[in-house]
Amino acid sequence: MKILLRDLKMFFRAWYRYLFVRGYRGFRQFERVKDAVAKILYRQRGRFARPFVHTAMGGMIAMAVTLAPVLASSFPGIDNSQVVDQAPANQVFDVQDNATATQVSDKVRDKVLQYTVLPGDTVSGIADKFGISIDTVRWANNLTSTGDIKPGQQLDILPVTGIVHKVTRGETIYSIAKTYDANPQAIVDFPFNTFADNETFALSVGQDLIVPDGKMPNVIPWSPTAYVQQVTPNAGTVSATGQFVWPISGIITQRFSWYHPAVDIATAFGTPVIAADSGRVIVAGWPDNSGYGNRVMIDHGNGFVTLYAHLSKILVTVGQTVNRGDRIGLEGSTGRSTGPHLHFEIRKGGVHLDPLTMLR
């Protein structure tokens, strides 16, 4: 046994020396070659940079040419040229297991399309299919509810979220933008809007004009999407006072209770809502499909958090700071609401407090 162990030890020792010597010699040779190449490149000061780049690009092109037939063969039975030639501008075809599925192309649409409602279609599903909002489908087709469609019905589909407006006498880009709470520059920039005079952006009576992101005035939106526009600037470093002012003036329509941990204040649609105290905005929008609708939440940094819900428009963004009295939104009726009002909450440590006992 001792003899066997001795022989094994000698065998592994010999292998170690052999591998060490061979490896050492190999690395020394590699270092010599590397040093020689480095000296040549240093002397030439970048003369070989262009040949190296060209060689690399040539290699990539050769690889692409080589792999192209392999990738094409992974889709047997499909003639891409025929698909492109025969497909309508707003559709592409995905062929799998001899079944054809229609999908909406990412190509920018230049006009209002006609869509035929299929069995199982919903307003939200159609809106998602064409990349527009639910309200865009609603307003373009005068729908009264999300269930107001049926198979075979023809729907107008706008190329972008917004409004299509038929111009009447005396209207201008600016008056139309004001009507639909839109940006006049966005109307001008939309590539498929035309003008009677490209210098003055004069309009022709009777023409259809796309108003991107336009909203029907005085209409409660369906879309669970916040109309957020930062109008109120960042206040910088702020410090809460612990004293809360009324966020809006109006009629109290519902008081604090165990099933309604807030106070509801009703007044005219679009009335400005202000921050009850200074703090940082932690929510601004409609992040879920809950009954709050468009809302703003402010962390006051002293344990207090206030919530302002059912807004028609939001004038601040998440992360910015506001002073007490700054405008944060406009009153509305988004979410689970029966009419324009502000749902106002005060929380401390996650516990709801009665706002009427704290407002000054």
Image: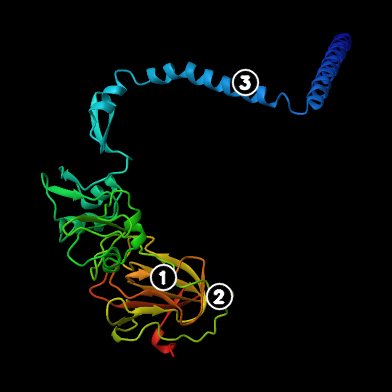
Foreground pick, 247 / 83: 83
Q: CA distance from mark 3 to mark 2?
A: 60 Å
Q: Is residue 249 left or right of residue 236?
A: left
Q: Is residue 134 left or right of residue 186?
A: left
Label 2: which secondary element:
loop
Quadrant of the snapshot with the C terminus: bottom left
Quadrant of the snapshot with the N terminus: top right
Callout in the foreground (3, 2) = 3
Callout in the foreground (1, 3) = 3
Label 2 neighbour load within 10 Å: few <14, some 14-19, many 20+:
some
Label 3: which secondary element:
helix
Q: Amino acid at mark 1?
A: Leu
User: Which residue matches tag 1?
Assistant: 315
Tell me which numbered mark, 1 or 2, is placed earlier along the sequence: 2
Check contact, mark 1 vs mark 3: CB within 8 A. no
| Residue at figure coordinates x 25%, y 26% from the top left | 85
User: Which residue matches tag 3?
Assistant: 55
Label 1 neighbour load within 10 Å: few <14, some 14-19, many 20+:
many
Determine whether 43 is above or below 142 in the image: above
Determine whether 67 is above or below 252 in the image: above
User: Which residue matches tag 2?
Assistant: 301
x%, y% of residue 185? 36, 60
x%, y% of residue 101? 24, 33
Q: Is residue 328 left or right of residue 89?
A: right
Q: Can residue 11 be seen in this snapshot?
A: yes
Label 3 neighbour load within 10 Å: few <14, some 14-19, many 20+:
few
Q: CA distance from mark 1 to mark 3?
A: 55 Å
| Residue at figure coordinates x 28%, y 52% from the top left | 193
